[in-house]
Image (tube, rainbow, N blue to C red):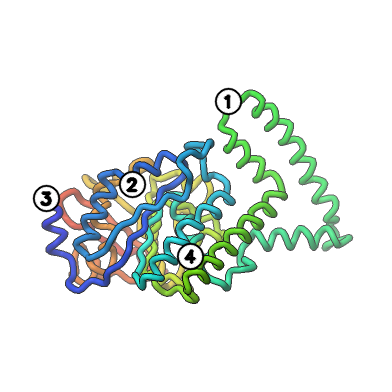
Amino acid sequence: MKKLFMLSSLLLINQIQATVIVTHGLGTTGIAFYQNSSYIQKIAESAQLMGHQVKCIPWLASYNPHKEYAGLLPQERIIGAVAIAKAIIDECAQKNQIILIGHSYGGHIMNCATRLLNPANKELTDSFICELITIIKKMTNQNQTRGFSPKVVLNTLFTGWQLSQVIISAIEKTDIINKNIIEFIKQHLSLSYLEEIKKAWDTAFNEVQSYKKIKGISHINNIKIVYTIGTTFSGDSIFIPDMQIVDHHINLYSIDDFMPALFGNQCAPLHERTSNLSVFIDPSKSYAPTHHNFCGNIVMAPWILLIPENLKAKKIGNFQNFQWGISGSITFHEQQPPTYIAYPTS
Protein backbone atom coordinates (compact mmCIF):
# COMPACT_ATOMS: atom_id res chain seq x y z
CA MET A 1 0.00 0.00 0.00
CA LYS A 2 2.86 2.35 0.85
CA LYS A 3 4.47 1.78 -2.55
CA LEU A 4 1.15 2.31 -4.33
CA PHE A 5 0.72 5.66 -2.57
CA MET A 6 4.28 6.61 -3.52
CA LEU A 7 3.59 5.71 -7.14
CA SER A 8 0.39 7.76 -7.29
CA SER A 9 2.23 10.80 -5.96
CA LEU A 10 4.93 10.48 -8.62
CA LEU A 11 2.79 9.94 -11.70
CA LEU A 12 2.22 12.82 -14.05
CA ILE A 13 -1.17 14.33 -14.77
CA ASN A 14 -2.77 13.93 -18.20
CA GLN A 15 -0.92 10.79 -19.19
CA ILE A 16 -1.53 9.48 -22.68
CA GLN A 17 -3.69 6.40 -22.29
CA ALA A 18 -2.19 3.27 -23.76
CA THR A 19 -2.53 -0.48 -23.91
CA VAL A 20 0.38 -2.30 -22.32
CA ILE A 21 0.99 -5.69 -23.96
CA VAL A 22 3.13 -8.12 -21.97
CA THR A 23 4.40 -11.51 -23.09
CA HIS A 24 6.41 -14.36 -21.62
CA GLY A 25 9.77 -15.90 -22.52
CA LEU A 26 10.92 -19.37 -23.53
CA GLY A 27 8.67 -22.32 -22.72
CA THR A 28 5.05 -22.81 -21.78
CA THR A 29 5.38 -22.44 -18.00
CA GLY A 30 5.50 -18.66 -18.28
CA ILE A 31 2.08 -18.46 -19.93
CA ALA A 32 0.08 -18.91 -16.72
CA PHE A 33 2.63 -16.91 -14.69
CA TYR A 34 2.31 -13.80 -16.79
CA GLN A 35 -1.46 -13.95 -16.64
CA ASN A 36 -1.89 -14.51 -12.90
CA SER A 37 1.28 -13.45 -11.05
CA SER A 38 1.80 -10.71 -8.47
CA TYR A 39 4.40 -9.32 -10.88
CA ILE A 40 1.73 -8.60 -13.49
CA GLN A 41 -0.61 -7.32 -10.80
CA LYS A 42 1.98 -4.71 -9.77
CA ILE A 43 2.50 -3.65 -13.39
CA ALA A 44 -1.27 -3.40 -13.78
CA GLU A 45 -1.57 -1.24 -10.64
CA SER A 46 0.92 1.33 -11.91
CA ALA A 47 -0.63 1.16 -15.39
CA GLN A 48 -4.07 1.88 -13.95
CA LEU A 49 -2.75 4.97 -12.17
CA MET A 50 -1.45 6.16 -15.54
CA GLY A 51 -4.74 5.45 -17.29
CA HIS A 52 -3.35 2.42 -19.13
CA GLN A 53 -4.71 -1.09 -19.47
CA VAL A 54 -2.59 -4.25 -19.39
CA LYS A 55 -3.02 -7.29 -21.62
CA CYS A 56 -0.94 -10.47 -21.25
CA ILE A 57 -0.82 -12.24 -24.59
CA PRO A 58 0.94 -15.61 -24.99
CA TRP A 59 2.87 -16.41 -28.15
CA LEU A 60 3.00 -20.15 -27.52
CA ALA A 61 0.18 -22.66 -27.13
CA SER A 62 0.01 -24.03 -23.58
CA TYR A 63 -0.20 -27.58 -24.96
CA ASN A 64 3.07 -27.30 -26.93
CA PRO A 65 4.78 -30.70 -26.55
CA HIS A 66 8.25 -29.17 -26.12
CA LYS A 67 7.13 -27.57 -22.83
CA GLU A 68 10.04 -25.63 -21.25
CA TYR A 69 11.94 -25.60 -24.56
CA ALA A 70 9.04 -24.50 -26.72
CA GLY A 71 10.06 -21.48 -28.74
CA LEU A 72 13.75 -22.37 -28.85
CA LEU A 73 13.76 -22.48 -32.66
CA PRO A 74 13.84 -19.10 -34.47
CA GLN A 75 10.93 -20.03 -36.73
CA GLU A 76 8.78 -20.75 -33.66
CA ARG A 77 9.39 -17.23 -32.44
CA ILE A 78 8.67 -15.72 -35.86
CA ILE A 79 5.32 -17.53 -36.04
CA GLY A 80 4.63 -16.69 -32.38
CA ALA A 81 5.17 -12.99 -33.10
CA VAL A 82 2.10 -13.03 -35.38
CA ALA A 83 -0.20 -13.12 -32.32
CA ILE A 84 1.44 -9.99 -30.89
CA ALA A 85 1.42 -8.22 -34.26
CA LYS A 86 -2.31 -8.89 -34.62
CA ALA A 87 -2.94 -7.60 -31.09
CA ILE A 88 -1.07 -4.40 -31.99
CA ILE A 89 -3.19 -4.02 -35.13
CA ASP A 90 -6.35 -4.46 -33.05
CA GLU A 91 -5.21 -1.67 -30.72
CA CYS A 92 -4.34 0.57 -33.67
CA ALA A 93 -7.84 0.01 -35.03
CA GLN A 94 -9.11 1.43 -31.73
CA LYS A 95 -6.62 4.33 -32.05
CA ASN A 96 -4.90 3.27 -28.81
CA GLN A 97 -1.28 4.02 -28.00
CA ILE A 98 0.80 0.89 -27.40
CA ILE A 99 3.53 -0.12 -24.95
CA LEU A 100 5.26 -3.49 -25.32
CA ILE A 101 7.01 -5.46 -22.56
CA GLY A 102 8.85 -8.64 -23.54
CA HIS A 103 10.76 -10.87 -21.15
CA SER A 104 13.70 -13.01 -22.30
CA TYR A 105 12.69 -14.53 -25.66
CA GLY A 106 9.48 -12.56 -25.27
CA GLY A 107 11.63 -9.56 -26.18
CA HIS A 108 12.37 -11.31 -29.47
CA ILE A 109 8.65 -11.74 -29.97
CA MET A 110 7.89 -8.05 -29.41
CA ASN A 111 10.76 -6.96 -31.64
CA CYS A 112 9.85 -9.42 -34.38
CA ALA A 113 6.23 -8.26 -34.25
CA THR A 114 7.32 -4.69 -35.00
CA ARG A 115 9.29 -6.00 -37.98
CA LEU A 116 6.32 -7.94 -39.29
CA LEU A 117 4.16 -4.81 -39.15
CA ASN A 118 6.39 -2.79 -41.48
CA PRO A 119 5.75 -3.48 -45.20
CA ALA A 120 9.35 -2.43 -45.94
CA ASN A 121 10.56 -5.67 -44.36
CA LYS A 122 8.92 -7.96 -46.90
CA GLU A 123 12.17 -9.30 -48.36
CA LEU A 124 14.05 -9.14 -45.07
CA THR A 125 17.01 -7.74 -46.99
CA ASP A 126 18.74 -6.44 -43.85
CA SER A 127 18.77 -9.84 -42.17
CA PHE A 128 21.87 -12.03 -42.05
CA ILE A 129 19.63 -14.99 -42.85
CA CYS A 130 18.81 -13.70 -46.33
CA GLU A 131 22.36 -12.51 -46.84
CA LEU A 132 23.81 -15.89 -45.94
CA ILE A 133 21.42 -17.73 -48.23
CA THR A 134 22.41 -15.41 -51.08
CA ILE A 135 26.12 -15.87 -50.39
CA ILE A 136 25.82 -19.66 -50.30
CA LYS A 137 23.86 -19.73 -53.54
CA LYS A 138 26.40 -17.43 -55.22
CA MET A 139 29.29 -19.58 -54.01
CA THR A 140 27.78 -22.72 -55.46
CA ASN A 141 27.51 -21.01 -58.85
CA GLN A 142 31.17 -19.92 -58.93
CA ASN A 143 34.26 -21.97 -59.65
CA GLN A 144 36.83 -20.02 -57.66
CA THR A 145 36.83 -17.16 -55.14
CA ARG A 146 40.24 -15.57 -54.41
CA GLY A 147 42.00 -18.90 -54.80
CA PHE A 148 39.58 -20.84 -52.61
CA SER A 149 37.20 -23.35 -54.08
CA PRO A 150 33.64 -22.84 -52.80
CA LYS A 151 33.09 -26.53 -53.50
CA VAL A 152 35.93 -27.50 -51.15
CA VAL A 153 34.61 -25.14 -48.47
CA LEU A 154 31.10 -26.55 -48.73
CA ASN A 155 32.38 -30.13 -48.79
CA THR A 156 34.35 -29.45 -45.60
CA LEU A 157 31.27 -28.00 -43.94
CA PHE A 158 29.20 -30.95 -45.12
CA THR A 159 31.73 -33.49 -43.78
CA GLY A 160 31.65 -31.82 -40.38
CA TRP A 161 27.88 -31.75 -40.51
CA GLN A 162 27.74 -35.48 -41.35
CA LEU A 163 29.98 -36.30 -38.40
CA SER A 164 27.84 -34.21 -36.09
CA GLN A 165 24.74 -36.00 -37.31
CA VAL A 166 26.19 -39.34 -36.23
CA ILE A 167 26.81 -37.95 -32.73
CA ILE A 168 23.39 -36.29 -32.54
CA SER A 169 21.68 -39.45 -33.77
CA ALA A 170 23.32 -41.44 -30.99
CA ILE A 171 22.19 -38.90 -28.39
CA GLU A 172 18.71 -38.74 -29.87
CA LYS A 173 18.26 -42.51 -29.58
CA THR A 174 19.01 -42.39 -25.86
CA ASP A 175 16.05 -40.04 -25.41
CA ILE A 176 17.78 -38.24 -22.52
CA ILE A 177 17.60 -34.76 -24.02
CA ASN A 178 14.53 -32.73 -24.95
CA LYS A 179 13.92 -33.21 -28.67
CA ASN A 180 13.56 -29.48 -29.26
CA ILE A 181 17.12 -28.96 -28.00
CA ILE A 182 18.34 -31.61 -30.45
CA GLU A 183 16.44 -29.92 -33.28
CA PHE A 184 17.96 -26.58 -32.26
CA ILE A 185 21.48 -28.05 -32.46
CA LYS A 186 20.72 -29.74 -35.78
CA GLN A 187 19.55 -26.49 -37.31
CA HIS A 188 22.70 -24.66 -36.30
CA LEU A 189 24.77 -27.37 -37.97
CA SER A 190 22.74 -27.36 -41.14
CA LEU A 191 22.36 -24.83 -43.92
CA SER A 192 18.81 -25.90 -44.63
CA TYR A 193 17.46 -24.27 -41.48
CA LEU A 194 18.06 -20.87 -43.05
CA GLU A 195 15.54 -21.68 -45.73
CA GLU A 196 13.09 -22.90 -43.06
CA ILE A 197 13.38 -19.61 -41.19
CA LYS A 198 12.91 -17.62 -44.39
CA LYS A 199 9.78 -19.64 -45.16
CA ALA A 200 8.46 -18.96 -41.66
CA TRP A 201 9.13 -15.26 -42.17
CA ASP A 202 7.27 -15.16 -45.49
CA THR A 203 4.29 -16.95 -43.97
CA ALA A 204 4.17 -14.70 -40.90
CA PHE A 205 4.72 -11.50 -42.87
CA ASN A 206 1.94 -12.24 -45.34
CA GLU A 207 -0.49 -13.16 -42.56
CA VAL A 208 0.19 -9.93 -40.66
CA GLN A 209 -0.05 -7.72 -43.74
CA SER A 210 -3.33 -9.41 -44.71
CA TYR A 211 -4.68 -8.77 -41.22
CA LYS A 212 -3.77 -5.09 -41.52
CA LYS A 213 -5.87 -4.86 -44.68
CA ILE A 214 -8.81 -6.59 -43.00
CA LYS A 215 -8.65 -4.07 -40.15
CA GLY A 216 -8.15 -1.12 -42.49
CA ILE A 217 -4.72 -0.23 -41.05
CA SER A 218 -2.18 1.08 -43.55
CA HIS A 219 0.43 2.60 -41.25
CA ILE A 220 1.56 1.81 -37.69
CA ASN A 221 2.74 4.77 -35.60
CA ASN A 222 1.16 3.92 -32.24
CA ILE A 223 4.02 2.02 -30.59
CA LYS A 224 5.40 4.42 -28.01
CA ILE A 225 8.01 2.24 -26.34
CA VAL A 226 9.29 -1.33 -26.25
CA TYR A 227 10.76 -2.68 -23.01
CA THR A 228 12.96 -5.76 -23.41
CA ILE A 229 14.05 -7.51 -20.21
CA GLY A 230 16.78 -10.15 -20.14
CA THR A 231 16.67 -10.46 -23.93
CA THR A 232 19.38 -11.81 -26.24
CA PHE A 233 20.60 -9.74 -29.20
CA SER A 234 22.47 -11.87 -31.73
CA GLY A 235 22.72 -9.19 -34.41
CA ASP A 236 19.89 -10.49 -36.59
CA SER A 237 17.44 -7.72 -37.41
CA ILE A 238 14.48 -10.12 -37.18
CA PHE A 239 14.72 -9.84 -33.40
CA ILE A 240 15.65 -6.16 -33.12
CA PRO A 241 12.83 -3.59 -32.84
CA ASP A 242 11.99 -1.75 -36.03
CA MET A 243 12.75 1.83 -35.04
CA GLN A 244 10.89 3.09 -38.10
CA ILE A 245 7.61 2.33 -36.33
CA VAL A 246 8.77 2.25 -32.67
CA ASP A 247 9.32 5.56 -30.90
CA HIS A 248 11.69 4.33 -28.16
CA HIS A 249 13.34 1.18 -26.85
CA ILE A 250 14.51 0.46 -23.29
CA ASN A 251 16.61 -2.68 -22.90
CA LEU A 252 17.03 -3.83 -19.29
CA TYR A 253 19.84 -6.33 -18.76
CA SER A 254 21.82 -7.81 -15.87
CA ILE A 255 25.52 -8.58 -15.73
CA ASP A 256 24.71 -11.76 -13.77
CA ASP A 257 22.15 -12.94 -16.30
CA PHE A 258 24.11 -15.53 -18.25
CA MET A 259 21.28 -16.74 -20.49
CA PRO A 260 21.60 -13.98 -23.13
CA ALA A 261 25.39 -14.37 -23.13
CA LEU A 262 25.01 -18.00 -24.24
CA PHE A 263 23.31 -17.04 -27.50
CA GLY A 264 24.45 -13.48 -28.20
CA ASN A 265 24.77 -10.12 -26.48
CA GLN A 266 22.87 -8.60 -23.59
CA CYS A 267 22.86 -5.12 -25.07
CA ALA A 268 20.68 -3.99 -27.95
CA PRO A 269 22.39 -2.38 -30.97
CA LEU A 270 23.16 1.30 -30.57
CA HIS A 271 20.44 3.68 -31.70
CA GLU A 272 19.65 7.30 -30.85
CA ARG A 273 16.28 6.23 -29.39
CA THR A 274 17.48 3.07 -27.65
CA SER A 275 19.03 2.89 -24.18
CA ASN A 276 20.64 -0.14 -22.55
CA LEU A 277 20.30 -0.09 -18.76
CA SER A 278 22.18 -2.49 -16.51
CA VAL A 279 19.93 -3.51 -13.60
CA PHE A 280 20.80 -3.85 -9.92
CA ILE A 281 18.49 -4.65 -7.02
CA ASP A 282 18.67 -3.62 -3.37
CA PRO A 283 20.20 -4.17 -0.85
CA SER A 284 23.49 -3.27 -2.58
CA LYS A 285 24.86 -2.57 -6.03
CA SER A 286 26.66 -5.90 -5.88
CA TYR A 287 23.32 -7.66 -6.42
CA ALA A 288 22.63 -8.05 -10.12
CA PRO A 289 19.72 -10.44 -10.76
CA THR A 290 20.14 -13.79 -12.45
CA HIS A 291 17.85 -14.70 -15.33
CA HIS A 292 15.54 -16.60 -13.00
CA ASN A 293 14.83 -13.65 -10.70
CA PHE A 294 15.21 -10.96 -13.36
CA CYS A 295 12.17 -11.70 -15.50
CA GLY A 296 9.17 -11.31 -13.22
CA ASN A 297 10.93 -9.39 -10.44
CA ILE A 298 8.31 -7.77 -8.19
CA VAL A 299 10.71 -5.04 -7.00
CA MET A 300 11.07 -3.85 -10.60
CA ALA A 301 7.43 -4.32 -11.60
CA PRO A 302 5.83 -1.10 -10.23
CA TRP A 303 8.43 1.13 -11.86
CA ILE A 304 8.95 -0.26 -15.35
CA LEU A 305 6.30 1.89 -17.03
CA LEU A 306 7.67 5.04 -15.37
CA ILE A 307 11.09 4.59 -16.96
CA PRO A 308 12.34 6.97 -18.15
CA GLU A 309 9.98 9.84 -18.95
CA ASN A 310 7.85 10.00 -15.78
CA LEU A 311 10.84 9.85 -13.46
CA LYS A 312 12.76 12.27 -15.66
CA ALA A 313 9.96 14.84 -15.67
CA LYS A 314 9.70 14.65 -11.87
CA LYS A 315 13.52 14.71 -11.48
CA ILE A 316 13.38 11.54 -9.43
CA GLY A 317 16.34 9.20 -8.86
CA ASN A 318 18.71 11.25 -11.04
CA PHE A 319 16.57 10.47 -14.10
CA GLN A 320 16.69 14.17 -15.01
CA ASN A 321 20.10 13.26 -16.48
CA PHE A 322 18.71 10.46 -18.63
CA GLN A 323 19.35 10.80 -22.37
CA TRP A 324 18.16 8.52 -25.12
CA GLY A 325 20.94 6.66 -26.87
CA ILE A 326 23.13 6.72 -23.74
CA SER A 327 23.73 3.55 -21.75
CA GLY A 328 23.60 3.50 -17.97
CA SER A 329 22.58 1.56 -14.88
CA ILE A 330 19.42 1.52 -12.84
CA THR A 331 19.04 0.31 -9.25
CA PHE A 332 15.61 -0.77 -8.03
CA HIS A 333 14.94 -0.27 -4.32
CA GLU A 334 12.44 -1.87 -1.97
CA GLN A 335 11.14 1.33 -0.40
CA GLN A 336 12.04 4.15 -2.78
CA PRO A 337 12.02 4.97 -6.49
CA PRO A 338 14.78 3.57 -8.72
CA THR A 339 18.01 5.49 -9.20
CA TYR A 340 19.82 6.06 -12.48
CA ILE A 341 23.48 6.52 -13.40
CA ALA A 342 24.56 7.45 -16.92
CA TYR A 343 27.66 5.74 -18.27
CA PRO A 344 30.39 7.99 -19.68
CA THR A 345 30.38 8.35 -23.45
CA SER A 346 33.60 7.95 -25.40
- Residue on which the image places disc 1: 176
Decide if residue 323 is on the left or right side of residue 189.
left
> Which corner quadrant of the image does residue 304 belong to?
bottom left
| Residue 142 picture location, percent across and down | 86, 62
Depth check: 160 or 286 in front? Answer: 160
- Kind of residue at badge 4: Thr
- Would residue 275 be visible to someone looking at this image? no
Quadrant (top left/top right/bottom left/bottom right) for the C terminus? bottom left
| Residue 74 picture location, percent across and down | 57, 50
Would you call the spot at circle 3 few (<14 residues within 10 Å), some (14-19), or many (20 or more)?
Answer: few
Sequence-first disc among 2 and 1: 2
Sequence-first disc among 3 and 2: 3
Q: Residue at x 80, y 51 (%)?
A: 153
Vertical placement of 274 versus 160: above or below?
below
Sequence-first disc among 3 and 4: 3
Sequence-first disc among 4 and 2: 2
Residue 35 is tagged as 2
Cα separation between marks 3 and 4: 36 Å
- Residue on which the image places disc 3: 1
Sequence-first disc among 4 and 1: 4
Would you call the spot at circle 4 few (<14 residues within 10 Å), some (14-19), or many (20 or more)?
Answer: many
Cα separation between marks 2 and 1: 32 Å
> Which corner quadrant of the image does residue 32 belong to?
top left
Residue 40 is tagged as none
Cα separation between marks 4 and 2: 22 Å
- Would residue 3 be visible to someone looking at this image? yes
Q: Nearer the viewer, mark 3 or mark 2?
A: 2
- Residue on which the image places disc 4: 114
Sequence-first disc among 1 and 3: 3
Q: Nearer the viewer, mark 4 or mark 2?
A: 2
Cα separation between marks 1 and 3: 48 Å
Depth check: 148 or 233 in front? Answer: 233
